[in-house]
Image: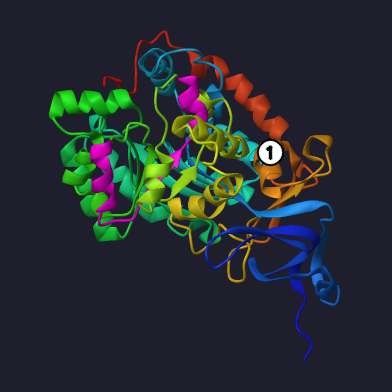
């Protein structure tokens, strides 16, 4: 019997690979066979020439990589890109962002999410972990645009029990949504806005419903020192005593993680991961960065992230990859850490693991979902290629991504977005800006005081 045609075959490309020791490598003149949204095989282009396929992509001169994962962002905040510039963290929150966010409507969130997804698809991001409000609207955008997402409805203790209950209801309602492309999480905001009782209740709900937790913790050194001064414990120690570290948890930022926190993280009963977004730390002039090397030594995956565009101005995970490598060299005083290959590992397998998808995406291998990006290296800024890993991390740009594929479906082909009408989104969002940006009411959704 003649086998049925594959859904998609990508030919004549160089494929980023992981060996059984999880080292990065490259397969030249290779082809990727995709069937029913799953990578069936990585073979030679010559072998692929004999196979039938519904769709073929000739990717000559391009590199195929696992789609990038943005491990921590607030996608709808692209609507606030550039409105709170050159401010310390406390003023950024209290004087601008939290007053504006008190105006948010579900339509604002939906439009912001659409614009964010367009930006991420064009930048080679196939999956994002989002932590925000009105997340039903974000889930609807994920469904329509074809991306993969790990979503949580954020809450503060100031909302009362309803905040925590809404976070749980969202997680249960949308788990497995968009044909399995949506996974969900409980999303308390942070130990400084969610009290111990709510954190403990969240940990219990996570155990009861087999859900992970995604929250900000020890975002910066000031938070860690303020927590010690006021409560005698670090934010990480708060997570331990409330049971959050007994379940799977994704910690955003962690630049305030102290030496005393490392044994606690090492001994956590749950799976711990950290998301690092170095551009924002530089912009806020935080004195420390995510301790990637110390976390690596504990076996804790560090995924790459952008945070929201209100603080980072960009959802460019490619830039986060390059900055992670450079900032780690500076922070450790060691030019050998991180190497380009290590940075690619963080951008692929480690980022997938950080959002609980380590067995689903993160590598191009048989059995993995076909989340793939094709990068054009023919531009003058990427030639000649002496070290392909270094070229990808330090020379290539997100704008070199030609094609973005999720679950075997092409979302962008040759730089043309196929699932989002950007001009329509930008036009409507612009009309809504005056009402969104109004701060004359004097309200805030929360108070930043660490």
How far across and down, in percent of the image, does residue 236 sit? 25, 39
- Which picture quadrant has residue 117? top right
**What range of the chain is rendered magenta?**
259-284
How far across and down, in percent of the image, does residue 10 sit? 77, 62
Q: Nearer the viewer, residue 89 or 134?
A: 89
- Which picture quadrant has residue 399? top right
User: Does the stretch in magenta take in 263?
Assistant: yes
Q: Which residue position is annotated with label 1? A: 398
User: Residue at 62% across / 51% down in the picture?
Assistant: 67
Q: Nearer the viewer, residue 180 or 272?
A: 272
How far across and down, in percent of the image, does residue 372 sit? 66, 55
Q: Is residue 162 visible?
A: no
The quadrant of the image that shows the C terminus is top left
- Which picture quadrant has residue 197? top left
**Image position of 288 (left or right of 80):** left
Outermost residue toward the top in this view: 440
Q: Is residue 345 visible?
A: yes
Residue 216 vertical placement versus 411 (above, below): above
Q: Nearer the viewer, residue 383 or 424?
A: 383
Report crowding for label 1: few under 14, some 14 to 19, many 20 or more residues within 10 A (C-alpha).
some
Q: Which colour style is shown?
A: rainbow
User: Does the stretch in magenta take in 399?
Assistant: no
User: Residue at 31% across / 49% down in the picture?
Assistant: 168
Q: Secondary structure at mark 1?
A: helix
**Image position of 172 (left or right of 228):** right
Residue 308 vertical placement versus 346 (above, below): above
**Image position of 228 (left or right of 41):** left
């Amino acid at each position: 019997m003649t086998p049925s045609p594959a859904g998609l075959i990508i030919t004549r490309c160089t494929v980023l690979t992981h060996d059984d020791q999880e080292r990065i490598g490259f397969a030249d003149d290779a082809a990727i066979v995709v069937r029913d949204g799953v990578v069936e095989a990585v073979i030679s282009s010559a072998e692929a020439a004999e196979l039938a396929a519904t769709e073929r992509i000739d990717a000559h001169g391009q590199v195929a990589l696992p789609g990038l994962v943005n491990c921590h962002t607030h996608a709808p905040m692209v609507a606030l890109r550039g409105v709170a510039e050159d401010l310390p963290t406390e003023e950024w929150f209290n004087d601008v962002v939290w007053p504006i966010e008190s105006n948010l409507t579900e339509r604002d969130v939906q439009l912001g999410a659409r614009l964010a997804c367009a930006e991420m698809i064009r930048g080679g991001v196939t999956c994002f972990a989002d932590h925000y409000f009105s997340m039903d609207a974000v889930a609807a955008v994920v469904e329509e645009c074809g991306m993969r997402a790990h979503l949580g409805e954020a809450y503060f203790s100031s909302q009362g029990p309803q905040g925590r209950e809404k976070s749980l209801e969202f997680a249960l309602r949308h788990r497995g949504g968009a044909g399995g492309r949506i996974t969900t999480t409980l999303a308390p905001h942070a130990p400084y806005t969610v009290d111990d009782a709510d954190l403990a209740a969240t940990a219990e709900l996570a155990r009861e419903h087999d859900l992970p937790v995604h929250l900000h913790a020890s975002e910066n050194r000031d938070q860690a020192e303020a927590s010690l001064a006021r409560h005698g414990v670090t934010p990480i120690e708060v997570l331990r005593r409330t049971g959050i570290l007994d379940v799977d948890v994704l910690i955003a930022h962690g630049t305030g993680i102290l030496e005393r926190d490392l044994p606690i993280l090492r001994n956590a009963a749950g799976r711990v991961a950290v998301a690092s977004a170095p551009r924002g730390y530089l912009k806020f002039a935080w004195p420390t960065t995510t301790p990637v090397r110390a976390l690596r030594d504990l076996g804790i995956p560090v995924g790459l992230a952008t945070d929201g565009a209100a603080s980072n101005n960009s959802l460019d995970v490619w830039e986060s990859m390059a900055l992670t490598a450079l900032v780690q060299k500076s922070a450790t005083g060691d030019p050998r850490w991180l190497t380009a290959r290590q940075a690619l590992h963080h951008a692929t397998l480690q980022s997938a693991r950080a959002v609980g998808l380590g067995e689903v995406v993160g590598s191009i291998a048989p059995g993995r979902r076909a989340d793939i990006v094709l990068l054009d290296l023919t531009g003058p800024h990427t030639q000649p290629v002496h070290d392909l890993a270094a070229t990808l991390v330090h020379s290539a740009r997100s704008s070199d991504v030609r094609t973005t594929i999720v679950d075997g479906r092409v979302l962008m082909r040759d730089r043309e977005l196929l699932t989002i009408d950007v001009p329509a989104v930008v036009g409507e969002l612009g009309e809504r800006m005056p009402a969104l940006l109004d701060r004359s009411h004097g309200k805030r959704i929360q108070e930043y005081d660490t």
